[in-house]
Image: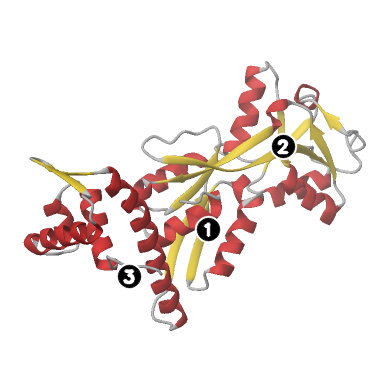
Amino acid sequence: MTKPLRFDLNDLRLFAAVAAAGSLSKGAASLPLALSAASARLRQLEHRLGLSLFVRHATGVRLTSAGEVLLEHARRLLRSAQDAQLAMDGLSGEQRVALRLYANTTANSTILPGALGRFLAEHGYVDVTLVERPSREVIAAVAAGEADLGVIDGDYEPPGLLALPIGRYRLAVLASPRHPLADRASISFRELASHDLVGLPDGSSMQGFVEKLARLSGLDLHMRARAPSFAAIARLVAGGAGVAVVPEATGQGYRDAMGLALVALSDDWAERELKLCLRQWETLPTMVRALAEALSGIAR
């Protein structure tokens, strides 16, 4: 027979607040709740559980091993309760949640749309504004609180922020069907450098990566044109301006829609990574955490 619960959401909310603050007085004040009432509630919770959750010391409190176990469950239960409330509010038209997601061009043209679309389909009360920026600007926006989350190139390690793997993609070469490379199955970057290229503007993470590799390899790239998006690049390629290094998944779309050729890059570094950039997990609002989980695939 299942035993009755020995705590409620208010108990868990207070317990989590005190654990996060490392102080009974600060945790109580954050709710807000009188210190005497908070102390009494926590002692009653420990009594009902038959376990000590905190070790009290001169400067505050710290979790016992039992407290650490309960905190993991408490955070999950509180997030679930908040999600349930938001869902009900959304269905009743009382409240919508607006999030801002910044991402670089590569993320927006590869793995992000599908994952974001699935999240929005499951959360009908959430609205997301997707802003495209270079990775450096994405990091700055997340750090400043302008963006709730960001997706950046895998080469970046943003100081003071978390960077979680979100997915991988491979680079390939997009060419006109009339171009000499169109019939090739693959090509090395060194050989590619002898052809006219079309690329993204200066400041783009992917373009910067390609040009950095060229410098390190002692190669001169002839950039005939730069365009602000992969769609514009594809049109330039189709017109004969040159060939372009693009994410393979993106290139497949233009190959199918525009009859362009897609040639594999044979270099090992052509496989790249994207990362999710976010502030400290404990500070994130419930729906920001939910979106982060959906994009990164992390179960917390």
Instruction: Using residue 226 as the reference point, say whether residue 84 is left or right of it.
Output: left
Q: Which mark is residue 4?
A: 3
Label 2: state its secondary structure.
strand
Quarter containing the N terminus: bottom left
Residue 236 versus residue 128 in the image, above or below: above
**Type of the residue with mark 3:** Pro
* Cβ atoms under marks 1 and 2 closer than 8 Å: no
Q: Is residue 222 left or right of residue 108?
A: right
Lateral position of residue 245 relative to residue 275, left or right:
right
Return the residue found at the far bottom.
92
**For residue 77, which quarter of the picture?**
bottom left
SS at badge 3? loop
Look at label 2 and name its amino acid.
Answer: Leu
Q: Earlier in the sequence, mark 2 or mark 3?
A: 3
Of mark 3 and mark 1, the one earlier in the sequence is 3
Number of numbered markers: 3
| Chain-order first, disc 1 or disc 2 | 1
Residue beneath disc 1? 130
Disc 3 to disc 1: CB gap under 8 Å: no
Q: Could you say which disc has been placed on residue 171 in the image? A: 2
Q: CA distance from mark 2 to mark 3?
A: 56 Å
Q: Position of residue 3 (x, y in %)?
A: 35, 67
Relative placement, left or right, of 17 versus 157 is: left
- Of circles 2 and 3, the one toward us is 3
Q: Position of residue 193 (x, y in %)?
A: 76, 25
Say which of 285 and 137 sits in front.
Answer: 285
Q: Residue at 56% of width from left, 46% of height from top?
A: 104
Q: Closer to us: mark 3 or mark 1? A: 3
